[in-house]
Image (cartoon, rainbow, N blue to C red):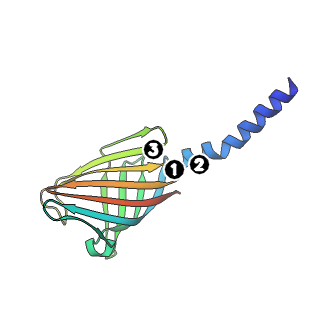
Amino acid sequence: MKKTSITTLALALLALPLTLQAEDIKDTFVCVTQDINVCKLHEGCRELHPVEMNSPDFWKIELKEKTITARRQDGSYGTVKIATQQMANDMIMMQGVLDTTENFEEGIGWTMAVHTGTGRMSIAVSAHEETISILGSCHAL
């Protein structure tokens, strides 16, 4: 009996850092862009450097406020509202829509996923006859 309770306590203590890490990332975290691919109808897909699109290189996600603030390559900042967010197993899933943007007059829809264990991030952006995929990694603040 004593051996079982010590084993149970040891397992609980080993699991504690993983639980805390997952809870920490649920509030505020920062992400960095590592890879961008753009696909256009009738033109195909190609990899771009973030500078070519003035794409954000750093993202600050605040789930309690439901906002994402990003710093673009030219040093400017922009903030978007997260319309929906929910957990799906170990993934934080966020979505939103922008009526118009600097590069897309028709507007865009986007989905962002962050894995709470690895910190890996993926973003899918849908626009008129164009999609953008962004891959990166995140760290809890």
Query: Closer to the observer: label 3 or label 2?
Result: 3
Tag count: 3
Identify the residue at image location x=47%, y=38%: 89
Give the residue at mark 2: 21
Residue 101, image quadrant:
bottom left
5 vs 39, left or right, is right
* Image disc number at residue 135: none
57 vs 24, left or right, is left
Identify the residue at image location x=81%, y=28%: 5
Return the disc, 1 or 3, that comes first in the chain's sequence: 1
Separation of residues labelled 3 and 2 (CA atoms): 13 Å
In the rendered image, the residue lying farthest to the right is: 2
The foreground one among 64 and 37 is 37
Identify the residue at image location x=66%, y=47%: 17
Give the residue at mark 1: 25
Give coordinates of residue 137: x percent, y percent. 46, 60
Residue 79, image quadrant:
bottom left
Give coordinates of residue 81: x percent, y percent. 30, 51
Identify the residue at image location x=42%, y=55%: 121
Give the residue at mark 3: 91
- For the residue carrying disc 2, how many other residues have a C-alpha within 10 Å: few (<14), some (14-19), or many (20+)? some
Three-letter amino acid code at the position of disc 3: Met
Q: Quadrant of the N terminus?
A: top right
Q: Is residue 114 above or below residue 16?
A: below
| Label 1 with label 2: CB-CB less than 8 Å | yes
